[in-house]
Amino acid sequence: MEFIDRVIHAITELHPLHAMVVHFPIALTGAAFLFVLLAWIRKNKIFEQTAFFNMVLAAISTYFAGASGVYDNNLNYDGDAPFAPIKLALGLTLSVLTTGLVIFRWKNPDIFDRARGLYILVHAISFGIVLVLAFLGGSILYGF
């Protein structure tokens, strides 16, 4: 029981919440980009559907990552973490972009066939934003 209490204490009191949550949009956006590229290369609709489902989860997780980032910034840096305004702007852009992509794809299931280049480009931009956010987050922890 002591071990469980220590884990709960570490999660809720010691370890920044953002560091635990932020890996989901990173991995899911990267996986979505990989699967949409595979769909294009292999001409396989199943890969595109997998990309879509990964992007759905990525879009949802960006809101949790953003909220936890704002929370940890206020808690650990008194609202003045390095690169905070840039990360906030990029995080909001990512949330809007991924959510917009998911909604648009949901309403237009054949978008991959009609506007493949644009669809892949939005995936690539989303993944690029995630990589920049990850780099800036690492710079906060480990220095630039």
Image: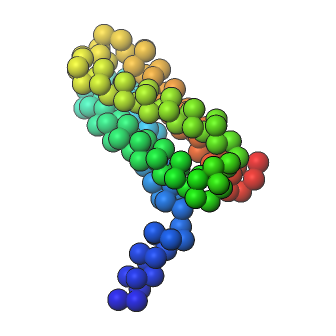
Q: Is residue 80 left or right of residue 38?
A: right
Q: Position of residue 45 (x, y in %)?
A: 25, 26
Q: Nearer the viewer, residue 2 or 73?
A: 73
Q: Position of residue 44 (x, y in %)?
A: 28, 27
Q: Position of residue 72 (x, y in %)?
A: 55, 55
Q: Please say whether residue 111 is visible from this viewpoint.
A: yes
The image quadrant of residue 29 is top left
In the rendered image, the vertical position of residue 72 relative to residue 88, given as above or below: below
Q: Please say whether residue 31 is visible from this viewpoint.
A: no
Residue sticking out furthest to the right: 144
Q: How many marks?
A: 0
Residue sticking out furthest to the bottom: 2
Residue in the picture at 26% in, 31% down: 49
The image quadrant of residue 33 is top left
Q: Nearer the viewer, residue 51 or 92?
A: 92
From the image, which quarter does the N terminus lie in? bottom left
What colour scheme does the image use? rainbow
Q: Position of residue 64 (x, y in %)?
A: 41, 47
In the rendered image, the vertical position of residue 9 relative to residue 65, given as above or below: below
Residue in the picture at 39% in, 19% down: 119
Residue in the picture at 52% in, 36% down: 91
In the rendered image, the vertical position of residue 27 relative to residue 94, given as above or below: below
The image quadrant of residue 7 is bottom left
